[in-house]
Amino acid sequence: MEKYLHKVNYYETDRMGITHHSNYIRWMEEARVDFLERIGWCYEKLEKEGIMSPVIRLECDYKLSTTFADVVSIEVAVEEFSGLKLKLGYRMYNAEEKLVFEAKSEHCFLDEKGRLIRLKNRQPEFYECLRKLAEERKEEAG
C-alpha cells in the first residue's frame, strides 16, 4: 500500500530544531486516518455505522531525529486482528529511507453507548477487510 507522506512543519520542532516527540503520535493518527480511507473504511463511514475505535495502547520506539521540512513517509499495516481488538504497526522513514520511528497502536471497537462490540456481528464487511489484511501481513512476515 502507498505510504502516507508528512512534511515536518516548523511549529512541530523544539528549540533544538528537532521534531518534538509528541508529533510522531499525531502523525500516526494522520496515517491511520489515511489508511482507513484507502481501504474503504474512513472514520466518517464507521461513525455513521455507529462504530468508534479508540486507542487503548501505544508502543513507540524513536530511532532517528527529524527536523523542519523533512518529508517523513509512513507505512501502516494491520499487525493483528481478533475481531475485538486491532493492532496496527507504523514505520516512519526519512528521505534517505532510514527508519526514524517505529510504533504500534491497539484499538477496540465500541458502539454509540461506549460498549465493546464484535465487528464480525456488527459490521462483517469491515471485519473481513481487516481479517484479510492481518492474514496478508502474517504471510509477508513468513
Image (cartoon, helix red, strand yellow):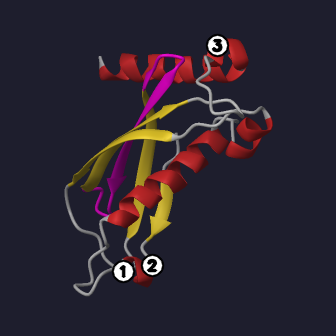
Q: Which residue is mark 2?
A: 9
Asked which secondary structure carries label 2, the reply is: loop
Do the residues under discs 2 and 1 have CB atoms within 8 angstroms? Answer: yes
**Closer mark to the observer between disc 2 and disc 3:** 3
Q: Which residue is mark 3?
A: 120
Across and down, in percent, residue 78 comes to: 46, 30
Amino acid identity at mark 2: Asn
Disc 3 from disc 1: Cα separation? 43 Å
Secondary element at tag 3: helix
Kind of residue indicated by mark 1: Phe
The mark tally for this picture is 3
Magenta-colored span = 80-98
Give the image quarter of residue 58. top left
Q: Residue at x 70, y 36 (%)?
A: 40
Residue holding disc 1:
68
Is 94 one of the magenta-colored residues? yes
Quadrant in the picture for the C terminus: top left
Query: Where is residue 93, by image quadrant?
Result: bottom left
Q: Tell me the distance, in whole angstroms, between the alpha carbons under discs 2 and 3.
A: 40 Å
